[in-house]
Image: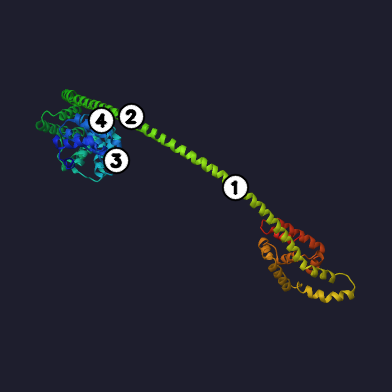
């Protein structure tokens, strides 16, 4: 891991073997994923792409249980590179997209930059020229993390421009010259440069570059392919055909087919190993399930026995408690019945006592009522003068002025447990003269006396009395019956 992160390629399997053996058996999914990935890296460094792909595939096997998106990015990127070398462009693109997705999820700015450049090259390999151009523009707009990679992508971009549906030789030459100023071009880079010069009409310069490459690189397969393209562009079809046949013979029969077959074999080996592993895991899982079921059945049987014992014990307790509850309920009902009878008797006695008290209270004012009636009655003058002094003395208790009436009201209120205060609370919309009227009704004055004291007509007294009594009867108040006992 340390060597890989420091860009030191090793082919020594002993570096990773102990860690791989341990984590592949005992590690969690993240450890297994990392161990398989670095095992694949060493095989890739050894140019054993089929074995590398096998271990990369193992690394992705349990990736759904791994939260390390950075590791997922590395594995998908490595698989994409393997498919790139085997010219399997669809799979190369698929894993490049996944690598970029996980890089973004991990927030890996360097990885996002690198994978964006690789994805642009994948689009170009698939001849998806618009997507390639858009992705290259995105890559070149990002901060540069590695100049070597940056200018390699410049060369790849120039190749896409030259091979695209609308080749732009001038733009391609400008990009390649910029890249050459910062980093020596590869054989393919110089081939691109020669092809761009040929396309721009500078056939002599193109031939010079191709000649120099032939003297330096010898019988290079990439050189043969680009030499075919240039000769074809020059109209030298015989030479072009010879180069094409030589290039195809070498690439198709030796490289492409061999790599493709090796990748298929690697995938097949991985699937076979995975199938065997799954069968073993399935057998172990069945054994575990059988053991768990047996233990569960024994536990359930024990719980059923325990439950039956508890249930019988609880049933006996319930029967005892039910018997006690019924007996308690019977005694409570009997006691309630006795209490209810006693309460009714006490309420009846209290009602009779209250009526007797009301009668006695009204009787106190009967003399005053009789004197008032006699005073205002049309009797003979000499008899009227005889009772005049007594009537004045008694009537002075009531008085026709407001102060005297308020004093009289206070006397009645105090002697009858605050009856006027309670009426004021229950009849908040009534005026003071209504309560003075009620006081006269409470003490038992007849209609004629009340009429003389208030200035109302006798008929008005009866009407007002009936209205007030109806309003009090409709009250939702605990004192309603108390009021009605005095207002009859």
Q: How far is mark 1 from mark 4, CA to CA? A: 94 Å
The picture places residue 405, in percent across and down from the top left corner, at: 73, 71
User: Of the numbered discs in the image, which one, if any, rests on residue 290?
Assistant: 2
Of 48 and 34, which appears nearest the observer? 34
User: Mark 1: few, some, or many residues within 10 Å (few <14, many ≥20)?
Assistant: few
Q: Quadrant of the N terminus?
A: top left
Badge 2 marks a residue whose secondary structure is helix
Chain-order first, disc 2 or disc 1: 2
Q: Nearer the viewer, residue 125 or 196?
A: 125
Q: Nearer the viewer, mark 1 or mark 4?
A: 1
Q: Residue at x 82, y 77 (%)?
A: 389
User: Residue at label 1?
Assistant: 331
Instruction: Please say if the residues under marks 4 and 2 sit with CB atoms less than 8 Å apart.
Output: no
Q: Please give the residue where the numbered disc 4 appears in the rendered image.
A: 89
Judged by depth in the image, the label closer to the viewer, 3 or 4, is 3
Compute the Cα span from label 3 to label 4: 28 Å
């Amino acid at each position: 891991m340390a060597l890989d992160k420091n860009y030191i390629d090793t082919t020594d399997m002993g570096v990773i073997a102990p860690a791989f053996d341990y984590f592949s058996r005992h590690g969690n999914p993240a450890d297994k994923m990392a161990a398989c990935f670095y095992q694949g890296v060493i095989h890739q460094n050894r140019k054993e792409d089929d074995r590398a792909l096998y271990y990369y595939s193992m690394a992705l096997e349990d990736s759904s249980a791994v939260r390390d998106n950075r590791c997922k990015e590395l594995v998908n990127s490595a698989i994409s590179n393997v498919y790139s070398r085997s010219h399997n462009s669809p799979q190369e693109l698929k894993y490049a997209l996944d690598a970029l997705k996980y890089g973004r999820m991990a927030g890996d700015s360097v990885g996002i930059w690198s994978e964006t450049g690789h994805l642009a090259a994948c689009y170009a390999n698939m001849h998806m020229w618009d997507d390639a151009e858009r992705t290259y523009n995105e890559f070149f707009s990002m901060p540069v993390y590695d100049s070597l990679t940056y200018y390699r992508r410049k060369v790849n971009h120039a190749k896409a421009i030259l091979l695209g549906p609308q080749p732009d030789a001038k733009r391609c030459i400008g990009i390649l010259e910029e890249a050459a100023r910062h980093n020596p071009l590869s054989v393919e880079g110089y081939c691109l440069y020669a092809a761009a010069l040929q396309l721009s009409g500078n056939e002599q310069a193109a031939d010079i570059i191709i000649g120099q490459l032939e003297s330096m690189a010898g019988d290079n397969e990439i050189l043969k392919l680009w030499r075919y393209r240039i000769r074809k562009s020059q109209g030298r079809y015989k030479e072009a055909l010879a180069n094409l046949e030589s290039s195809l013979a070498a690439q198709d029969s030796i490289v492409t087919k061999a790599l493709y077959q090796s990748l298929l074999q690697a995938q097949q080996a991985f699937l076979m190993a995975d199938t065997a592993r799954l069968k073993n895991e399935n057998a172990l899982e069945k054994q575990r399930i059988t053991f768990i079921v047996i233990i569960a059945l024994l536990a359930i049987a024990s719980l059923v026995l325990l439950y039956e014992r508890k249930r019988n014990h609880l049933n006996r307790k319930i029967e005892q408690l039910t018997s006690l509850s019924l007996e308690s309920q019977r005694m409570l009902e009997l006691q309630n019945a006795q209490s209810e009878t006693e309460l009714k008797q006490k309420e009846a006695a209290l009602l009779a006592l209250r009526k007797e008290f009301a009668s006695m209270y009204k009787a106190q004012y009967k003399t005053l009522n009789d004197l008032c009636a006699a005073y205002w009655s049309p009797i003979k003058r000499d008899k009227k003068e005889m009772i005049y002094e007594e009537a004045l003395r008694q009537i002075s208790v009531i008085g026709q002025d407001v102060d005297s009436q308020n004093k009289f009201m206070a006397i009645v209120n105090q002697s009858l447990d605050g009856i006027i205060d309670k009426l004021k609370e229950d009849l908040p919309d009534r005026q003071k003269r209504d309560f003075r009227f009620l006081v006269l009704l409470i003490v038992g004055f007849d209609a004629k006396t009340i009429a003389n004291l208030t200035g109302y007509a006798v008929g008005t007294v009866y009407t007002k009395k009936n209205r007030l009594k109806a309003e009090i009867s409709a009250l939702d108040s605990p004192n309603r019956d108390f009021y009605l006992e005095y207002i009859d």
